[in-house]
Amino acid sequence: MKRTHYLQPGRTFTQALLASVLLTGCFSLLPSNGGGQTRPPTARTVRAADIAVPSGYRVEAVATGLDFPTAVAFDEGGRVYVLEAGYSYGEVFTVPRLLRLEQGGGRTEIARGQNPPWNGLDYANGTFYVAEGGEIGGGRIVKITLDGRVTPLVENLPSLGDHHTDRPVVGRDGYVYFGQGTATNSGVVGPDNAEYGWLKRFPQFHDIPCQDITLTGQNYRTANPLTPAADTVVTGAYQPFGTPSRPGQVVRGQLPCGGAVLRVPQQGGPLELVAWGFRNPFGLAFSPDGSLYVTENSYDVRGSRPVFGAGDPLWKVTPGTWYGWPDYHAGRPLSEADRFTAPGQPAPAQLLAQPPGTPPKPAALLGVHSSSNGLDFARNPAFGDVGEAFVAQFGDLAPVVGKVLGPVGYKVVRVNVTTGRVEDFAVNRGPQNGPASKIGGGGFERPVDARFNPAGDALYVVDFGVMTTTEDGQLPQRQTGVLWRITREGAP
């Protein structure tokens, strides 16, 4: 991150500089202490009282024992539906399902799929819209009727890499908007993608631009995890692993593409580009005034081109805009001296000879490695904070994605999209921030979605469940997911 020195009264510049050097040195020397870096619990405890919320609000657990839940939605009658992903990082595959939660605690399976993960969910006019990530078979947007019939709306989306097809939302204009993540962390296929599992399955897969781009010819030499021999390969941006790029090389844009917000008519039709230049636009939501907002999971400190200190932006989406990936973060170039350079690593080199546009500034900037995901906007005065965004933060995946000195995320934050102010709304009680499996208690593990019910007087929070982490990757625990509900006492 950028070393900006703010002098306190009584401190000289030399003292401030020394303090900065010491802090930087400590970061390099201290071990990572992420929220997932703990011993997996033998069982999950669920206790709503262990989640702190503002005075006048209350938390309750609506459903427990869910299997990798990722989203929640509601029909016209206010009945609650939960999506189970069927896949988790850590290469754990199950069955993706759409479930209805019945009064009295029962659950009815509405539909199931064969191409996980199912990442996002919306409902409109008797139809569910599901983002099918397609870790093995490629991404789709599918329609599911209340009687369980599944039909594809969009197919062959580029979801075979690190990031998948993300939450769909139905707009007032009759279009289904959704996010499509990139193949890689920062534009170059590398050994980290073998660790994520997909490079050995799809060695020719790579990032796809939405419009024509010209490359600088920057290449990276890395170890080759595809062969038993200790050989190396050279890889360029937007190229398959082991394929170098050339200065001035033009890569043609196409649809579908990665790192974009796309849309399609509800009844089917041609796919359209809304905006691009995102890394992983996971959460989409419309504000009360009809503006589209998206949360972006930003760069990690991993792979051939690690990027340091990149918080997760919350963007207001302007159609036709390029938002900066893979050469900018939150409107600032990655080439900015020292700001995005990981300790002991070279600065991220520029990949594009000319930027496709001037990236804007985000509406807000959320925590580095917080994995800020599903969101919704308050719209009912009975709940409060009308017009503000409520964002579920899945939490860091350190140490694989980069080092953190303490857990980041694992909570729900409230964002004023006009001022950019971010405040905790629902967070685990305890002496430090983190998931319940690390700090104790029975509160949040990994919030992945936040959604208001149709009346707008209750906020539902989808908790993916226990996922611990090691240097080798993620260790998710099945059937530990929870659906929470937050209401305001005294509200009608």
Image: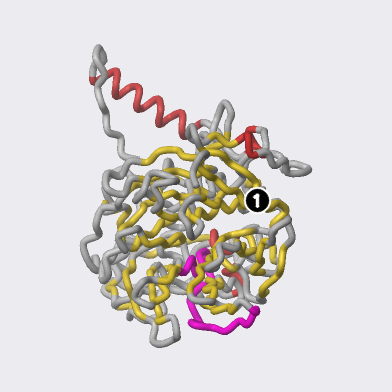
On the image, the x and y values in percent for residue 429 come to 58, 31
Image-based side of 390 in relation to 326, left or right: right
Question: Is residue 434 depicted above or below 296 in this figure?
Answer: above
Q: Circle 1 sits on which residue?
A: 62
Image-based side of 266 in relation to 224, left or right: left
Q: Residue furthest right?
A: 42
On the image, the x and y values in percent for residue 35 come to 58, 40
Image-based side of 458 in relation to 465, left or right: left
Along the viewing direction, whichever of 19 and 364 lies nearer the viewer = 364
Which amino acid, mark 1? Answer: Val
Along the viewing direction, whichever of 377 and 57 lies nearer the viewer = 57
Regarding residue 46, the answer to whether it shows in the image is yes
Question: Is residue 256 depicted above or below 182 in this figure?
Answer: below
Point out the image quarter for the N terminus. top left
**How many numbered discs?**
1
Determine whether the residue tagged by mark 1 lies in a helix, strand or loop: strand
Q: Which residues are magenta?
A: 147-168
Q: How is the image coloured?
A: secondary structure
Q: Residue furthest front?
A: 492
Q: Residue at x 47, y 69 (%)?
A: 168
On the image, the x and y values in percent for residue 392 come to 49, 50
Q: Is residue 33 magenta?
A: no
Q: Residue at x 54, y 59 (%)?
A: 192
